[in-house]
Image (cartoon, rainbow, N blue to C red):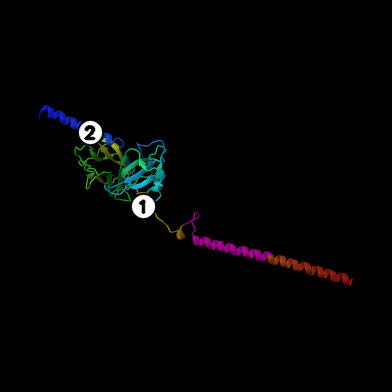
Amino acid sequence: MSDECRVCLLGLIFLSSLLTGISGENDAHVFISSGENVRLPCNNAIHDCNSTTWNYNRFRNSTAVELIGLGIKKKDTESHERLSLGSDCSLNIRNISTEDYGLYSCQQWTGVNRDQQEGTDARVYLHVLHVSSSQTEISAGLSVTLFCQFYSYPPVSCDDSDSSERIQLFWVNQAGVKLTRSDSRYQISAPDHCIITLTTTLLNEDDNREWRCEVTQRDQVKTSVTYTVKSSAQADSTTVIPVTDSPTAAGITTEEIVIVIAVCASFVLLLLALILWMMIRKKRSGVRRATDDSVVSFVG
């Protein structure tokens, strides 16, 4: 290739990269773990948020969903309770789930009727990392598989390729050491697109042990999810006793308590009846004595 062609080729590459940078200057990529809160920046915000509209799209060529319209939150969306608009027009989302990944677009609308878009969209690509377990009950001797999945828009390839993005998933132990397939205790596999699994048999010393799944982009950690082993062996050994048979602090049953209460109530009623009877008898005795005294006085 001649020197002139090389110069032309380099010029085209430079121009292409320059144009790409200009068109995507307001774009942002946000990596987050499920369950966390996230702030999505609006890089084209103007003097107030009354002109700000946020749209959401997860699939290519699909209709966008309006989340915020001219500064007002839409209430007909599934995630509206978790959304809020920041003072800088950023979009805040609480308790991120795997359903939240996708493309978010911030727009500015001006004019008398707010019908003229100001500038271009400021796009935010939200990527979510999520870890789940094959077991709900954890105890020593059980085999457990941890699933780590990366949800991204647009979809990327999570492998060892030398792509420009170079997205990779790793499992590391609590010391931060990468776990590899050569370790006989762990079985690590990538069965599907952007999923990496960790399978191991739990030991007694694994209680409170941490394993962490990391996602990296160009060898830089973007976010991670930590899974902590909490043994349920102690909970499994606890016997649940029905309420009707539950012993009290004194060691008697509910039925016995009912009998004691009934006996005490009967005794109280009997005591009240006895007191009432004695009062009536005393009163009658007083009347009889007064009558006898009056008769004696008359005879005398």
Residue at horizontal 85%, vertical 71%? 295
Q: Against 10, is 259 above or below?
A: below
Which secondary structure lies at badge 2? helix
Q: Amino acid at mark 2?
A: Ser
Res. 236 mark: 1
Which secondary structure lies at badge 1? helix
Q: Is residue 249 magenta?
A: yes
In the rendered image, residue 209, in percent from the top left (x then y), is placed at: 32, 42
Q: In this rendered view, identify the residue nearer to me: 30 or 240.
A: 30
Res. 93 mark: none
Residue 72 visible in the snapshot: yes
Q: Foreground mark, 1 or 2?
A: 2
107 horizontally vs 287: left or right: left
Q: Against 231, is 292 above or below?
A: below
The span shown in magenta is: 247-275
Name of the residue lying farthest toward the right: 300
Q: Quadrant of residue 85?
A: top left
Identify residue for label 2: 17
177 horizontally vs 44: left or right: left
Q: Amino acid at mark 1?
A: Asp
Name of the residue lying farthest toward the front: 112
138 horizontally vs 164: left or right: right
